[in-house]
Image (spheres, grey):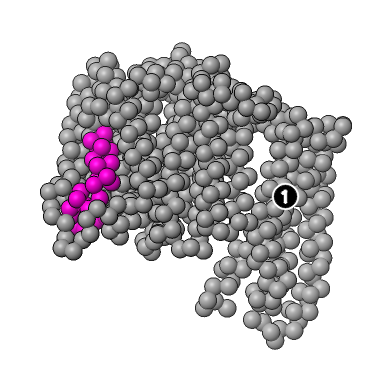
């Protein structure tokens, strides 16, 4: 690991919070401008990956243990899917957001926000998991 | 079937759930699969997967009943009307295919428990059932959807999960087999999506029914011609049409036994359904069928595949590989039916989808049980297996006879139908090809029978050491089905006939 690269370590510590914040911006601004769950998830994951590159996979696993990423993977998919099921229970078709609120426009708005949150959660967890698995291979450094 | 639909309507909440069945068929396994990650327990995941797949099988039966009673079912996802939204459309053809894949999916799971515990390492078993459910989701999705792009998405879901399933096989060669399938499968999916992209370019639509009405106007363009070629070759790769079958033997041979059973009976079948749907329904109204001489091309490739697959199978030393090459040959029969492109031919093709799923499932289950007990399925190691595992070997014998096409088994029904279809067109040499290739099947089945019954078991081998009952019962059920539907071919032939009508119905004008 790059324990002696002081410049990199300090700069990255400055960068990681804005990266995570930017990810949230891309996530929730996705329905007004370019962005959305997938891009946000990748950016969010890259914050953790940058940390892992500089401080080691074991350190990042203290922050985000494997059980947490696994939970995120599942939670994201289920958030998406169950939003669809909610539409179904509320009397619409599967993934029909119109019925989620009294006003169909608001319904569509809530629906897409929740669904994209699910996408973001799963994508971020998947990026981190893939990196950790490859970087955590014995023999690699 | 109709009785099952009537029974379903008596259940609580049936009236509320009933309109959503087409989407629940896909959503239930899709959302239940991730739960396995939370369970992270081999036995619990197995139990969960079993409950879910049997539920899905029940839904498929209800849907088939509903289709037979009331015709086409249409479901608009998110209430967006087609062609803008994604539409699920269930007619006799995909309802039948749904029943086939969910039935195999459900019956494989009781069998899988013991087999997987033996072949897959304990901490990975929950992943196995997760991937199994995702693969089932993908296959169901391909079958249900009426949107050409959505089909691609489900194709990827089923393919990616099947690469993982194959790579879970015990030997390291499973990894190379899986990688090879990954390369070929990705090529196939890419070709398909290029074809869909070209169709979208010319028509601006991805909905299959919409494409079918829009394509005839532009069918003289080179773009649509190329789209047709890309789609046929792409799906040809996925369904292991000769000479695009090279990924199949190793993938089937090195995958865990339960995966081989499942994939051999479902994955190629669904790809064939997709080819039928695209060629007969989407391109059905166009003149491309005649312009490209695809009929002739498919028939020639099918006949070569029938012979080549069976011929190579004769020389295999590993029974799993032998059956895998036999699959290449059997896929030839299904492609032949598409190539004939008459109602009788397509009926033969579809009935063989069902029949081959039943008999190949039984055969691979028997071989998997032999692997469970003996630890190898090389012919040399199976000497006298007929005395050591009488029930399993009997199941293999029934399945083998069915692969040959002996009367009173399902193989006979579909071959008879195909021969009739070929004679109807006056293609005598094709009919003769079907019969001659059956002779080759006798050769490879006989090799196993000879080793199993005529050679003495090795010294010290325990007699009558059958696999666990949980493995025996599913394979006996499939073998019984192979005989039952071989005697009563009317039911399956009638269903297949309706399916063929549903596929070709939209396109009667453009048929050759």
Q: Could you say where residue B88 lies in the image, as x and y percent from the top left?
A: 60, 29
Q: Could you say where residue B64 lies in the image, as x and y percent from the top left?
A: 51, 24
Give above or below for B87 relative to B476.
above
The residue stretch that appears in magenta: B377-403
Among the 4 quarters of the image, the one containing residue B38: bottom right
Residue B281 in sight in this render:
no
**Which residue does the image show at 38% across and 42% down from the upper left?**
B474
**Which residue does the image show at 74% across and 47% down from the upper left?**
A116
Could you say whether the residue bearing mark 1 is in a helix, strand or loop? helix
Give above or below for B158 relative to A94.
below
**Which residue does the image show at 42% across and 21% down from the upper left?**
B495
Among the 4 quarters of the image, the one containing residue B173: bottom left
Give above or below for B389 relative to A97.
below
Residue B512 in sight in this render:
yes
Work out which residue is located at the far top of the displayed protein and give it. B509
Rate crowding at label 1 as few (under 14), some (14 to 19) or many (20 or more) other CA atoms within 10 Å: many
Q: Could you say where residue B55 lies in the image, as x and y percent from the top left?
A: 55, 37
Q: Nearer the viewer, residue B239 or B47?
A: B47
Among the 4 quarters of the image, the one containing residue A111: top right
Residue B114 appears left or right of B23: left
Residue B410 falls inside the magenta stretch: no
Magenta stretch: dominant secondary structure: helix
Give above or below for A123 relative to A2.
above
How many marks do you count on the picture? 1
Residue A5 appears left or right of B279: right
Residue B70 appears left or right of B393: right
Q: Nearer the viewer, residue B451 or B217?
A: B451
What chain letter is assigned to the residue under label 1? A
Q: Which quadrant would the C terminus of chain B be assigned to in this image?
A: top left
Residue B396 falls inside the magenta stretch: yes
Q: Which residue is mark 1?
A: A118
């Amino acid at each position: 690991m790059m324990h002696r690269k002081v410049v990199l370590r300090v700069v990255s510590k400055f960068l990681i919070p804005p990266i995570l914040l930017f990810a949230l911006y891309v996530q929730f601004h996705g329905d007004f401008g370019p962005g959305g769950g997938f891009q946000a998830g990748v950016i969010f994951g890259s914050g953790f990956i940058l940390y892992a590159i500089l401080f080691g996979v074991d350190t990042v696993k203290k922050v985000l243990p494997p059980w947490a990423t696994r939970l995120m993977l599942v939670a994201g998919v289920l958030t998406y899917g169950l939003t669809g099921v909610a539409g179904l229970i509320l009397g619409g078709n599967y993934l029909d957001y119109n019925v989620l609120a009294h006003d169909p426009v608001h319904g569509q708005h809530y629906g897409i926000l929740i669904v994209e949150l699910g996408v973001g959660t799963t994508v971020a967890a998947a990026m981190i998991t893939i990196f950790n698995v490859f970087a955590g291979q014995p023999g690699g450094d | 079937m109709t009785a099952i639909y009537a029974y379903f309507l008596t259940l609580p909440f049936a009236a509320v759930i009933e309109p959503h069945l087409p989407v629940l068929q896909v959503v239930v396994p899709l959302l239940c699969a991730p739960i396995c990650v939370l369970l992270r327990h081999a036995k619990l995941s197995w139990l969960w997967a079993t409950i879910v797949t049997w539920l899905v099988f029940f839904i498929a039966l209800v849907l088939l009943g509903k289709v037979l009673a009331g015709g086409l079912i249409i479901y608009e996802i998110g209430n967006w009307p087609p062609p803008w939204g994604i539409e699920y459309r269930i007619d006799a053809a995909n309802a039948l295919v749904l029943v086939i894949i969910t039935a195999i999916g459900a019956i494989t799971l009781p069998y899988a428990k013991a087999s997987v515990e033996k072949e897959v390492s304990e901490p990975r078993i929950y992943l196995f059932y997760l991937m199994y459910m995702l693969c089932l989701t993908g296959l169901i999705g391909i079958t249900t959807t009426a949107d050409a792009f959505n089909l691609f998405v489900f194709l990827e879901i089923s393919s990616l999960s099947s690469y993982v399933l194959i790579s879970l096989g015990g030997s390291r060669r499973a990894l190379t087999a899986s990688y090879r399938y990954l390369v070929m499968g990705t090529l196939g999916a890419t070709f398909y999506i290029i074809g869909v992209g070209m169709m979208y370019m010319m028509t601006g639509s991805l909905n299959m029914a919409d494409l079918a009405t829009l394509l005839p106007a532009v069918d003289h363009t080179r773009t649509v011609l190329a789209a047709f070629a890309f789609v046929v070759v792409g799906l040809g790769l996925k369904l292991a049409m000769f000479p695009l079958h090279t990924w199949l033997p190793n993938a089937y041979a090195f995958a865990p036994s339960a995966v081989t059973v499942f994939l051999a009976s479902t994955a190629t079948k669904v790809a064939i359904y997709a080819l039928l749907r695209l060629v007969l329904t989407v391109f059905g109204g166009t003149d491309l069928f005649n312009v490209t001489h695809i009929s002739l091309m498919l028939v020639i490739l099918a006949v070569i595949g029938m012979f080549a697959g069976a011929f190579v199978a004769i020389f295999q030393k590993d029974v799993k590989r032998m059956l895998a090459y036999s699959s290449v040959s059997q896929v030839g029969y299904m492609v032949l039916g598409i190539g004939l492109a008459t109602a009788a031919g397509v009926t033969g093709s579809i009935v063989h989808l069902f029949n081959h799923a039943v008999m190949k499932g039984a055969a691979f289950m028997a071989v998997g049980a032999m692997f469970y007990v003996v630890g190898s399925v090389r012919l040399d190691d199976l000497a006298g297996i007929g005395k050591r595992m009488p029930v399993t070997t009997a199941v293999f014998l029934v399945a083998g006879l069915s692969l040959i096409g002996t009367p009173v088994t399902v193989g006979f029904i579909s071959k008879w139908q195909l021969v009739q279809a070929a004679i109807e067109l006056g293609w005598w040499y094709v009919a003769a090809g079907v019969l001659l290739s059956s002779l080759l099947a006798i050769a490879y089945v006989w090799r196993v029978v000879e080793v199993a019954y005529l050679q003495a078991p090795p010294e010290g081998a325990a007699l009558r050491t059958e696999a666990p009952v949980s493995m025996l019962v599913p394979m006996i059920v499939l073998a019984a089905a192979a005989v039952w539907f071989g005697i009563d071919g009317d039911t399956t032939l009638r269903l297949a006939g309706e399916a063929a009508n549903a596929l070709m119905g939209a396109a009667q004008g453009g048929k050759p």
